Image (tube, rainbow, N blue to C red):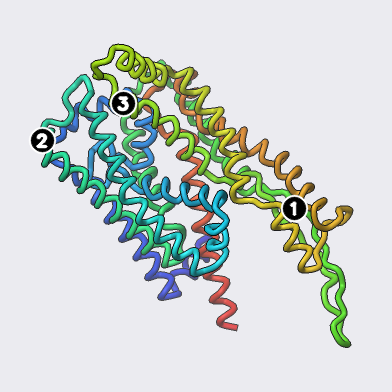
Amino acid sequence: MWQKFIQIWKIPDLRKNIFFVLVMLGIFRLAAHIPVPGVDIGNLKKFFESNQILGLLNVFSGGSMENFSVVMLGVAPYITASIIFQLLMMIIPRLEELGKEEYGRQKINQWTRILAVPLAALQAYSMIAMLRQSANPIITDVSPWRLFSTVMTITAGTIFLMWIGELISEKKIGNGISLLIFAGIITGLPAAVQQALVVFDASQILNFVIFAFIAIVTIVGVVIITEGQRQIPVSYAKQVRGTKMYGGSSTHLPLRVNMAGVIPIIFAISLILLPPMVAQFFVQAKTAWIAGGAQWVIDIFRNQLVYGILYFILVFGFTYFYTAVIFHPQQIADNLQKNGGFIPGIRPGAPTAQYLGATTSRIILAGALFLAIIAVLPMILQQVTGVQVLQFGGTSVLIVVSVVLETIRQIDSQLTMREYDGL
């Protein structure tokens, strides 16, 4: 490991790129502590502690949402816009064709940035509207000008983070958006540990030991599932061109256990967060049945059992859904057939596509169950151990481990590339 650090330090451009990424992450953390004026931070923190879903989003943002900072939304609107275009590419053939070309991908990325702006403004206004209806006064100034300036400030903060994320991605030291989420989660860990130590009771030492053991097992499980894959053998037929013979090699097609990453969890959080946020707008409606229905929706989603069951089902279902969006067995089968490749014992074409689809469905079952369990793990731990202050759950561990592994891969690929350049 130390040899790797020494090797990185000896490469000037790689060393500069890593320093640049660290500086950008430092700027992000500085912006996360710049609050928007006119907010009672004390009442805001109490509100987030009483809401499981917003508490999880606050962990992702590294506490910037709890501080009501200028970057409180993080990169969530950009991620939502990306998901929307990925779904549209699945529905609209023209967008699917654009996604296969470099120029088309650049256009789609530009449209994604544009869509993120109104989404950020809408989400900022929804958050403010929800906080204004809290029992304890959180936003002290609700004048139209203050509302407009606050929404614009929060939207600008999201666009600023989008720009930082793209600058980081250009350095090829990891995905910029993922690293921003990673930095937010990591910076929230010391505060969670400190809070746990403050309320530490000798009678709960067994619960803390259980929590630590489960955390270690979770990290090991995340690494195994993230790196786990099934290797499908692929053979290439020999081809004669002129007087020379090509092909005849054997390789494998890796199918990952968790192809979807953390996207299903983000899908599920967005969907679960939507009904109570919309219901907040109708709680004070003049029509009695509308106000009653809105309050019923809010109460239902505050029920930990109902929330946990819905969360589990949504994550499990979205894992299969998103895998179907990004993995196309028919396209892979066509590419294999065009290049003279085939799976031993399986006929090329449609039978290969059917085999890949059936194999993927069986593999994804383990990945979907794992993601769903990881998603509800914090609630299970809180119920078993009785420790309510440990919010650093399995989802956070999954994101942290995935980002670290991806960053290590990119750094290793750059080191390997420079070794070949030296030769």
* Structural crowding at the residue carrying mark 3, measured as other residues with C-alpha within 10 Å and reported as few (<14), some (14–19) or many (≥20): some
State which quadrant residue 270 falls in: top left
For label 1, the residue is 231
Q: Is residue 126 visible?
A: yes
Q: Nearer the viewer, residue 310 or 211?
A: 310
- Please identify, in this view, whether the residue under mark 2 or under mark 3 is nearer the observer: 2
For label 3, the residue is 49
Disc 1, SS: strand
Task: Name the amino acid type tagged 1.
Answer: Gln
Q: Position of residue 81 (x, y in %)?
A: 41, 49
Q: Earlier in the sequence, mark 3 or mark 1?
A: 3
Q: Residue at x 23, y 39 (%)?
A: 68
Q: CA distance from mark 1 to mark 2?
A: 60 Å
Q: Residue at x 38, y 22 (%)?
A: 388
Disc 2, SS: loop
Task: Name the amino acid type tagged 2.
Answer: Ser
Q: Position of residue 171 (x, y in %)?
A: 42, 67
For label 2, the residue is 143
Whether tag 1 and tag 2 are in contact, CB under 8 A, the answer is: no
Task: Name the amino acid type tagged 3.
Answer: Glu
